[in-house]
Image (tube, grey):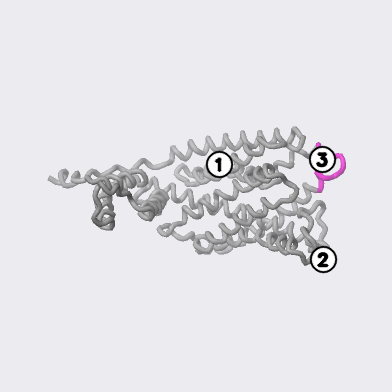
Amino acid sequence: MSLLEDRYRFVLRLLLPASYRAGREEEMVAAFLDGAGELSDRDNPRPRASEVASVAALAVRVRLGSTPALPRYHVLGRAMRLAAVLGLAFHATLGGVWFAGFLNAYGLRDRLGVDVPGALGAAAYGDPGSAARLLDVAQGFTGLLGAAAFAALILGRAGTAKVLAVLSLVALYAGTARTPGLTAGEAAMIVLSHTLVPALPVLALLAGFHRDAPAPRRPAWLAVLPLAAAVPLYTLLSLLNGRAAVAGAVERWAWTWPWMDETGLACLALLAATAYALTRSRPASVLPPALVLLIVPVALARAVALTGPSAGVDAVALTWAVQLCGLLACGAALLVRAIRALPPREPVAVPGEETAAGR
């Protein structure tokens, strides 16, 4: 065996499951060697970066597969795609809430004659006609990118959904990083805690909806459901914010603050989904592993928050700790359920075994 062949085989063993390599490794190695040309061991040949990248992409498609012929990877692929759909739906809803706050900041509430006590929405940023104001307006409309990405995915346009979701994540990073009046350390902490939660669904979308994955088949009316849910959610959050902002009630309502931000709302949604998954879902459902994937970034975001300042209110830090403990407990219970329901590993076919058995 030449040095190059040995290295090709090492790459395949490192990235591809044994059940997949059993019937394809020899053919793949032969194809790689044919494309490499005449190289000797003295040349210290190595697999090209493009070849390693192609094997890595193949590994993702196999391990997040769409064919029932590999049942374990089929379940993992379905769980990854479900996590992407659920995560994008949540962030599409929050995008609608942010957009409502943006409209409120620019006086639409006054023009429509609608008065919601404590309505969310920061004040307009920058002077009228300035570059800062233009950037702020553009940033406000990016809240709809998440809703557009979710709608595209529901309508079967996974490629379009990927582009919109990545743009939404980039806009979120940019908007969080440009918060005025923060030191570099504070900005880094905010960026880390506020972007961990939306990053996972985008990664799940990119990895789970590969070219071999089936297009989502869901009712078209689901595409507008997040924006419809954003209206009552915005009203509820505004009312709670108005109650908490009343003079003398700040300390008394401090425990509600950790439930009203993005991570707190994600925690509430995951706790409710976990209760459903553990009591009503079928044993073979892909919901438990999908929820485990979604719990990880939310728990990390709360852990990051606990390492920072708690605004001098003990109730805030205590609530963060309670949320983190609840997420960890839910994640552990769901992980046990998911592992128990996971199909066994596929048997690895030994070359020549079928021939010997036939004799």
In reply to whether residue 335 is colored magenta, the answer given is no
Q: Is residue 65 visible?
A: no
Q: How far across and down, in percent of the image, does residue 212 sit? A: 40, 58
The residue type indicated by label 3 comes to Val
Quick check: marks 1 and 2 in contact, CB under 8 Å?
no
Mark 1 lies on a secondary structure that is helix
Front residue of this view, candidates 100 and 125 = 125
The residue type indicated by label 2 comes to Arg
Name which of mark 1 and mark 2 comes first in the sequence. Answer: 2
Q: How far across and down, in percent of the image, does residue 306 sit? A: 66, 35
Residue placed at 67% from the left, 51% from the top?
Answer: 177
- Quadrant where the C terminus sits is top left
Front residue of this view, candidates 138 and 277 = 138
Q: Which residues are magenta?
A: 242-251
Residue placed at 59% from the left, 38% from the top?
Answer: 327
Mark 2 lies on a secondary structure that is helix
- Quadrant where the N terminus sits is top left
Residue placed at 72% from the left, 59% from the top?
Answer: 100
Q: Residue furthest right?
A: 247
Q: How far across and down, in percent of the image, does residue 26 sit? A: 24, 50
Q: Which residue is mark 2?
A: 111
Q: Is residue 348 visible?
A: yes
Q: CA distance from mark 3 to mark 2?
A: 30 Å
Q: Which residue is mark 1?
A: 296
Rendering quarter of residue 10: top left
Predominant secondary structure in magenta?
Answer: loop
As drawn, the label of residue 321 is none
Rendering quarter of residue 152: bottom right
Q: Which residue is mark 3?
A: 250
Residue placed at 44% from the left, 50% from the top?
Answer: 77
Name which of mark 3 and mark 2 comes first in the sequence. Answer: 2
